[in-house]
Image (cartoon, rainbow, N blue to C red):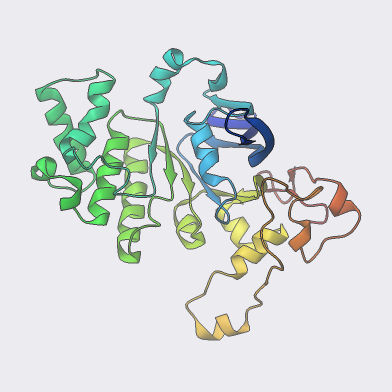
Amino acid sequence: MSEKKNNILIEARDLTKYFPIFKGIIRRQKIADIKAVDKISFYIKQGETLGLVGESGCGKTTTGRCILQLDRPTSGEVLFEGIELGKLDEEALRPLRRRMQAIFQDPFGSLNPRMTAGEIVGEPLFVHRLAKGKEIREQVEELLRIVGLNPAMADRFPHEFSGGQRQRIGVARALALRPNLIVCDEPVSALDVSIQAQIVNLLEELQEKLHLTYLFIAHDLAVVQHISNRIAVMYLGKIVEIAPRAELYESPLHPYTQALLSAVPIPDPAVEAGRQHILLKGEVPSPINPPSGCKFHPRCMRAVFPQCGEEAPDLRKKNGAEHWAACHFC
């Protein structure tokens, strides 16, 4: 999957990440691979938000880490403004890391408990030698204001903040280097519902103000619907559907997407009672030994044999210029 328009900020081409499994202590022997991400392709345009959704263990977080080069891909390409990141060593990658930042899922575990909020937010400026001394303090105060925190809180430690405030510190840290791309790895899943809305609204305001681009990873389809321009659906290491937000929610094509959306509750008892809920059979297969052919076929209500069990469908354009699905029969 590729796009010819020149406003693409980040693009993945056949991105693959396998984690080897070894046995033995003295003589370690590779016995299998965990196929966390398996030849996926997508792009994100400058200034937009691509939502990445799917069940736990489908490879969403690994995809984000490969985009940031925190995990080097097994194969495939990640292009940032046309630059292939996999060909760069750590020294050459360093200036590009300033432009790609992350907001993590756990707002407490991702913050160093021995550092104050000011030290946490200012650390990227010190490490990349963009400021020092009084300059760092001034920039930290400005960053805290931007995310809705009182600069007077800069001397407090993480345990002195609420969960929502800690996540705001994480957002401020991500903004410190003035990035173009931020990978948001389930940034609101550990927060109360009311606080989730505040953080999502903050991210939207920052995107408009600072012209940011987001890869927004989540399993909450309601949150993804609110913040995303386009949505990619993952299943067992594969992207099975990508479409603009409204089109995906109104006309999902892939059976897995349809099942996911049918599980989202609607706050209207009459409508909810009349809806059809799709119950998937079986469990998610192991990424160590995924099914042949279409990976979803053991649980699919529309699977046709032998085609679905033997032939893996490609991600192809379906409805409209930006609606793609990987299914033989949709």
Tell me: residue 210, above or below residue 220: above
Q: Quadrant of residue 264?
A: bottom right
Q: Residue furthest front?
A: 26
User: From the image, which quarter does the C terminus lie in?
Assistant: bottom right
Residue 129 shows up from this direction: yes
* Residue 42 vs residue 126, the one in the foreground: 126
Tell me: residue 150, above or below residue 136: below
Give the residue at x 19% y 20%. 131
Q: Residue furthest right?
A: 306
In the visual, does 257 lie left or right of 203? right
Q: Quadrant of residue 277?
A: bottom right
Tell me: residue 69, above or below residue 103: above
Give the residue at x 77% y 50%. 291
| Percent coordinates x, y for residue 88 in the rendering | 52, 15
| Percent coordinates x, y for residue 104 in the rendering | 38, 44
* Residue 51 vs residue 169, the one in the foreground: 169
In the visual, does 92 lie left or right of 277? left
Q: Quadrant of residue 226?
A: bottom left
| Percent coordinates x, y for residue 100 in the rendering | 41, 30
User: From the image, which quarter does the N terminus lie in?
Assistant: top right
| Percent coordinates x, y for residue 258 in the rendering | 67, 64
